[in-house]
Structures are given as structure tokens and as C-alpha cells.
Amino acid sequence: MSEHIKVPDVEPIVLYAANGTQTIFSYPFPIFASEDLKVYLDGAEQVSGFIIEGAGNTNGGDVTFDNAPENGVIVTLERELTIERVTDFLEGGDFSAQSINNELDYLIAAIQQVSRENDVMLKYSDHEMPGNVELPDSVQRANKALGFDGSGNPIAVSLEGSMAQPDFTASGTGFVTRTSTDKFSDVVSIKDFGAVGDGLNDDTLAIQQALAAHDSVQIPNGSYLTTSTIELLSGKSIIGLGQDSIIKCQSDSFNAIEVNGKNTFIHNLRIENGDIGIKLYGKDSECTQNIVSDVQIIGTKTGIQLDGYTDSAKPCYWNNFSRILIEQPLTHGMHFTKSGAGDTPNANKCHMVRVYSKGASTTGSGFYVEYGANANTFIDCEANVNGSTADSCFRIGSNANKTMLVNLYTESTNVVPNVKLDAGSVETSILNLHAQSNGVAIYDLSGGEYDAYNAGYPEKNSLRKTVVSDLKATLMRYDTEFIDTAGKTSIDFSHSVHIVNATNGAIEIELPDASTAIGVVVTVKKVDNTGNIVTITEDGGLGPDGKDIQLGGLNDYATMLSNGANWYITASNRLSGNTRFADTSGTYDIDMAVDTYLLSSFGGALIARLPPANATKAIGRTVTIKKTDSSSNNVTVTEQGGNGADQSSQILSSQYAAITVVSNGSQWYIISKYP
């Protein structure tokens, strides 16, 4: 069993004055993991540019900087733990000595941390009775100094007299006079902390110190060279004055800005170089409701990255990006990913984000949603990538679902795909795709797991299972499958019409079980003139209309519909003929409801009267009339208001005598007559 940390009585903080050459600084107290040690330069926390060694050692370890801190800079190494339980003991389970030792070590270290924080606070002496510890409220202490009354309690003291500052008065109705100090404190600039902005001097520390001291910091016009990452924690904002407010990374070995918190704001500035321009991830807290707007990012490996990171309780959700230009990215313009066991980046919104290779050898994609879920949305976005090196303009990865692309513009050359859907991606929605790349509009490897409207080529729309309450279509198209393999073929729902050629031998077309095909319509048509039969059956069921159906002749077909219980034939040239039998006398009107009329005149002579030849129900119809009885009573076939078939009445005088007639709309013609 490995030795656990023993927490000695050592204050969990150490400070050094840098000499400009020293790169290794020791910390004499134990830490449980490298994340427990915070590194500060002149009070500004550092997140890159160093490595931490010695985590898990009782006697501490070392911090090694990539570059020696400048002479006179105060280097602070401090253990900062999250106050939480790190183990849990189960009822009736094994009671591990190592587990309880680790838990107690962590508790002692946390107590040392709280004790050290108390040591640096103003407090009452143990030898007097504590008085009031509350400050006067904000209205009372505004523009005043902190003093103490006769009892030693805190009060607000006026700055009038020799301490008074010049006043500032705005013009206009409703003005309020304020001190100049109060007015100047409205906006805090990084230049207030020593930033130069000439692109030559290192302004990293000045920016970090400004953010450590204030929630909102202004980046004036200038080029501010940085040598390590600028980190934004919850509630912090950096606001530039336009594209001449530049944060310029010295190299691509570190990220320009990292957002590790919520409700941050990055606005109206320009970022040059760096590994990632802006990275959002939940390292120490959830990374949510952050806003990046009116930002230009140039020459980074990746412009913006959202990382689900390692902890699902610290997600990267609900972030907003607007009016952003990412120029000359070397890998990806915008990248959604997950580098550990955390959750996928979800429900992030991008509006008017443009990625433009502009000659750079971009190797990835303009936008790459490698991981993502629950409506990551891209509206009015654009990707114009290098046609010689890029993978795609817009790529949806195998671990992405419910991604929404609206009014997307894509452009490239050399068959770079406009939108690439990886196998495993699902429920992608594409609305209005303007595809200008030479590659396919939608390169689908997902198996059709996407919906499209006015997107793709040559078919602009692709819809999956859809319910429509009222549909008017001017043109309907059906997917068609050709089958010519002898034996059994089990059809699925990928095609509506199946053209079958049985030249190579008899074919069985097996329909899916009706219970799996509610509302599905399928047509099967035989197109060869051989004697080989095409038989339509049902998997585990009785077949269409409760029995198998055979297609034996050229162009025999059947169209079938499932209601979830059975398959029913809705149209076929193989249906049994409709027949009606009547035993009567006098006049019997042929109503054209069936194809064959079997008439018995046993009770007396019978007149079978056809409708007028120009009647709507008669035009183009063929009908057969047959005498079935053996009596001498005739069946006379006439026409209502007309002369009859072939312009005369036709008499059926013997048993089994029959006549078949057809109307062309002007008169009835005899097709056949027996005898």
C-alpha cells in the first residue's frame, strides 16, 4: 500500500522575489494534485507557462517556469483546496485505513487554508470586547474614507478639506456631481496597471493584475504582447475599443484567453496568434452564459474551442457568440469537443460567425462539432476554407446530435465537402444551405440521420418520418428498387416501389410484419414476360388481403397498405372480378357498379338496360351480361335513351348466352357475344 500524505504544520503559502534568472521555485507544503496549487505573479493568477511537480509528496515540490519571471516580480505559491468530501464510507463496507488517512489529511489541509486566510484579516484583539464589524452601507460610505468613532467602530469619514478631490459635473438635466476619483473609477484600463501596448513589451502581468483587481477591464487601442494565457473567471469582462485593441500572443504554445467560469464578456477586440484564440471549459466551475461578440481572431491554430472537459458537473452550456471573424486558422475555425469525462458542449448559440482561411493551410474544418448535443445552433454563419488542405467547410462529428444549421454559407475548391455528416451523428437539421464549394453539398455518412430544407444538391430537401395533417403536392416522387435475384427478397422501408424481373427464376417478395409498418404503402410490379411467378408474402403474417398473391404476367402489379394489423391491397390488376347476380323480371338497370352481371329470367322475360353511352359512369367502361337460367324467357340488352349495343337491342335467349360491351362515350359497342 502506498504511503499517504502526512500534513505537517507548514503554512500553505510561500512568496519569492524573482531575480530575473531563477526558473525553479519550491513549495514546502504538500498538495494532493497539481490543481491544488495556485501560482501568482504580483497577485495575478497564472494558468500556463509552467509545470508543477511533487503532487502527493509530504515535503512538497517545485514549480518550474518556461521563462524566468522578471526581476522584482513577487512569485506566490499557494495551496487552495475545494472544501469538499473526497471519500464516502459504505454502511457495512470495508473500513480502509488509507481512505480515512486521506480524508483526515485533506481536512487538516483545508483547516490550515482557512487558518491562514484568517491570519491576514483585520480583526479585534483577543484582549478586548469585539464591537461593530459591519461597514456603513454603500450610500453612506460612497466617496468617503473609512474611519473609527469614539468607541472604535467603523464609520464613513468625509473627504472635505485638504483630502477633497476635484468634482466632475456632467452637462444636462438631472446631473449629479461626483468626485473625479469616483468618475475615473467607472472605467479601469489595463494601462492603469502598467500595460504599454507597443507590441514589444510583455503586458501579460498587467492584464492579469487588472482582471484580478476588477471585474470589468478595458483594452485601449494598442498591441498588447502576452507570453502566457489570460484567464477569465466568473463575472469578468474584457472590453476593447475596436479592432485596434489587440491581444497578441508571442507564440502558439499557449492559449490567448481561457474562460473558466460563467457570465463573462469578451467584446470588441482582436486576438492574434496563439494555440487557441478563446477556449471555454469548466475547469474550476461550470462554463455557462458567457458572451463573445465583435471579436476578430487571426492566425491561431484554432479560433474558438468549447471543451466539455473532465467533469460533467461543470458543463460548457448556453454560451453565446455573435459577429465574430476567425481568419487564417491552421486547424479549425470553431471546435466543439470533449477532452475528458465531462459532458458534451450543449445548447450553445452562434450568430454571424465567419471562418476564412485567407491563404492559411487550414487542415481541419471551418466549424467542427466533434462532440455536442441539444441544439448547438449556428445561424447566418460562413466557412470559406483552403481547398488544398481542409477536410470540410462544416463537419458534424460522430458524437454530435441535434445540431442546427440555419442560413449557412460554405465555400472552397477541389471537392471539399460543404457539410460533412460523420457516421454516428444524428438529428442534424440544415435549413437554407448556400453551398459554393466544388465538393458535395451534403456529404452524408450518417445514413440519412438528418433533415434538410432548401439544402443539398440536386435534391434540396431531405425529410425523415414526418406527420402532415393536410398536404397538397404538385409532384410526388418515389424511391424505386430493382430486384432480379431468384429466391426470397425481404423488402424494407427504404423504397416505396419495387420493380421485379423474374427472368432468372421465381421470386418471393416478403413484406415486413404489418405491425412494424403502420401507414406504409408498397408497390410491387413484375416487368418480365417469362412464366416465372412473383409471389408476395408477409413475414410472420397471412399476406396482403389475408393470403399470398401471385404476379404471373407482364406488368402485373399490386399496391398494398398496412394499418398495423394487416396488409391490404389498395390497387392491383390481379384482383378477382366483381360480379353481381340477379333473379328477376321486367326491367333491370345496369348501374355499372360491377364488371359482370349474372341474370336469371326464370320468372319472366327480362330487359337489361344499359345507361346512356355518354353517362360519366359508362365512358370507357367494359361490362359483361350473361343469362344463367334454362327457361325460354329472353334477356334483352337495351340502352336507356339510346339504340343499344352496335345500335340495336341484343337478345340472350339460351342458358349461358353472354355479351360483353364497351362505351366510347358516344355509343355502346359489342366486344364479344355468345353464342
Image: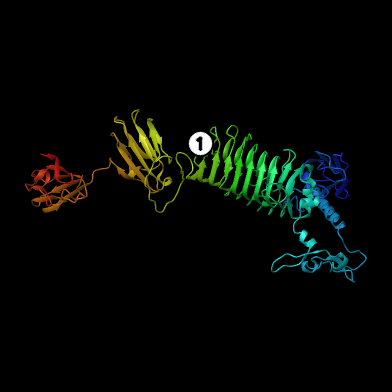
Q: Residue furthest top?
A: 504
**Drawn side of residue 396 relative to residue 611, left or right:** right
Q: Residue at x 14, y 52 (%)?
A: 588
**Drawn side of residue 485 relative to residue 59, left or right:** left
Q: Residue furthest front?
A: 171
Q: Is residue 224 above or below residue 508?
A: below
Say which quadrant the C terminus sits in.
top left
Say which quadrant the N terminus sits in.
top right
x and y, in percent, of residue 461 in the image: 46, 44
Residue 274 sits in which quadrant?
A: top right
Q: Amino acid at mark 1?
A: Val
Q: Does residue 535 appear anywhere in the picture? A: yes
Q: Residue furthest left?
A: 632
x and y, in percent, of residue 30 in the image: 84, 45
x and y, in percent, of residue 360 in the image: 64, 35
**Drawn side of residue 346 relative to residue 139, left or right:** left
Identify residue for label 1. 440
Q: Is residue 190 above or below residue 512?
A: below
Q: Secondary structure at mark 1?
A: loop
Colour setting: rainbow
Of 551 and 620, the residue lying toward us? 620
Of 253 and 176, the residue lying toward us? 176
Q: Is residue 368 above or below residue 470?
A: above
Of 404 and 129, the residue lying toward us? 404
Q: Does residue 397 appear anywhere in the picture? A: no
